[in-house]
Image (cartoon, coloured by chain):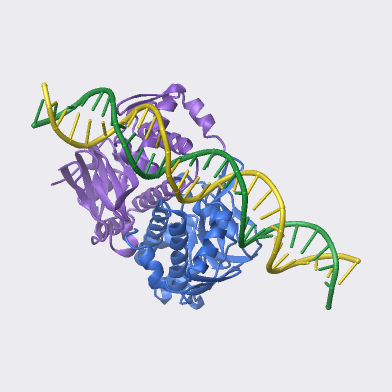
Chain colours: A blue, B purple, C yellow, D green
Amino acid sequence: MSSINCKNCALANLCLPFSLNENELETLGQYIIRHNHIKREEALYRKGDTFNLLYAVRSGAFKSTLHQHEREQVTGFYLPGEMFGFDGIHGKVYTTNMIAITESSVCEISFDNLLTASQKIPSLQQQVYSIMSQEIVTDIRANLHQPAEIKLLHFFMQLSERFKRRKLSPTQFELPMPRQDIANYLGLANETVSRLLTKLQDDGVIKLNKREVELVSLEEINKALAFVG
Amino acid sequence: MSSINCKNCALANLCLPFSLNENELETLGQYIIRHNHIKREEALYRKGDTFNLLYAVRSGAFKSTLHQHEREQVTGFYLPGEMFGFDGIHGKVYTTNMIAITESSVCEISFDNLLTASQKIPSLQQQVYSIMSQEIVTDIRANLHQPAEIKLLHFFMQLSERFKRRKLSPTQFELPMPRQDIANYLGLANETVSRLLTKLQDDGVIKLNKREVELVSLEEINKALAFVG
DNA sequence: CGCGGGCTTGATATGAGTCAATTGTCGTGG
DNA sequence: CCACGACAATTGACTCATATCAAGCCCGCG
């Protein structure tokens, strides 16, 4: 756990620091605390815990989950540069469990401090609104009722865009999560996901090697998704 | 179209004015514009339109929609006292169509003005965060993958809570939308919804008369939904 | 009074889930 | 370094929930 400097962070332009000047970065930095070495499957918080902190993924990946009749349901994934915890603002408690998918590290800021800081720094306030807006858009799109194959392609394209934002390849990347979590998130059986993945490979749309994906033709995929959204 | 006074609004405690003092209400009021007589099926905005304005439902009801291979998909409902348009902040364009379900009226405020005002009024800023947070929670919960009957009961309970917030009966209310829209929103065929509604009536869980619903026993319903969420 | 949209009901089709067995993969310890 | 065990992914056979297709009904409106 250590106080941190956002200036040197490669993810700054996705995160709170976006569009802040040197002085403002300095101010913000005072409020940020870093947590390293969050272990796989460790819960950062659980549904019902008192809300205080917002988080940004620094490295690794997280999934948010809820319990459904003894089963876990994955409600979202969070990758480096992405923030989470906003669901807790309204009711003062977190409404999901937040679990590390791999060894991870995060930056945290207390909501109260963020309020104070964003009162002083207009562009920070703007950025918080923007990030929350983005989460709303993501959540709405996750609701779309489509056949399994389309859902899966959508999911891949969404990941692709998120990797692109980080200046990584949008066509070749490693899935941060196991098939099970993908299936669960999309509301499918993992057998279904498995079958579709082999089908998509047979069709030449994607290439797969364990968690390594290659999207062979973004154009083809986008064609399949046309008129969606 | 007219400038408006939030002080006398019965919905103030659900909306932006929540927790503002007289002076602050005065300030906020300057920025609010009212639109009456929005006709059934009229679009307040469409996906892709430039984002500027946030809205609060004053009377009536709205649905947000997206297009999916020639079909419309309903992505949300907005009832009196509820705000919408936040999805447009991030990308500067609205990401859904917003359509009046019945003759309606709204209050609108430009996002720029809201930013300015909330810079001056901390509790206003807090309230905007809270409302956006609430939308996130709603959207996440709408994603849960459950059998049709549970989805439908969830939907009724959600409506129940929203009516309760407005100090209306949580057990007897009128559905603001036709069955078709409910089915579409939940990702079901309207035949399925229709069948389930008659089943729920036969089971004595609800009573229905056209759009008039009575939830016979909230306890029973909550029991069926236990372990969910 | 008749027309039409929304709703209900029935018969059938199908996409995806479940169950079950097999294979593949990785980490650990002998 | 290899063998084992545990878990993740795949594949196949079968089932089931819900969609689709097809009438018919009910009520409000012109």
C6 and B11: which one is in front? C6
Q: Quadrant of the C terminus of chain A?
A: bottom left
Instruction: Identify the image quadrant of residue B94.
Output: bottom left
Q: Is residue B62 visible?
A: yes
Q: Is residue A94 visible?
A: no
Residue at x 47%, y 60% (from the top left corner): A152
For residue A171, above or below residue B39: below
A116 and A159: which one is in front? A159
B13 and A150: which one is in front? A150
Measured from the top left, where is residue B49 in percent x and y?
23, 60
Residue at x 52%, y 54% (from the top left corner): A185
Q: Quadrant of the N terminus of chain A?
A: bottom right
Measured from the top left, where is residue B178 in percent x and y?
29, 36
Left/right placement of residue D5 relative to residue A45 reads right
Q: Count all numbered tags in the image, as a single digit.
A: 0
Measured from the top left, where is residue A173 in percent x and y?
53, 73
Left/right placement of residue B113 relative to residue A33 reads left
Measured from the top left, where is residue A159 in percent x and y?
47, 66
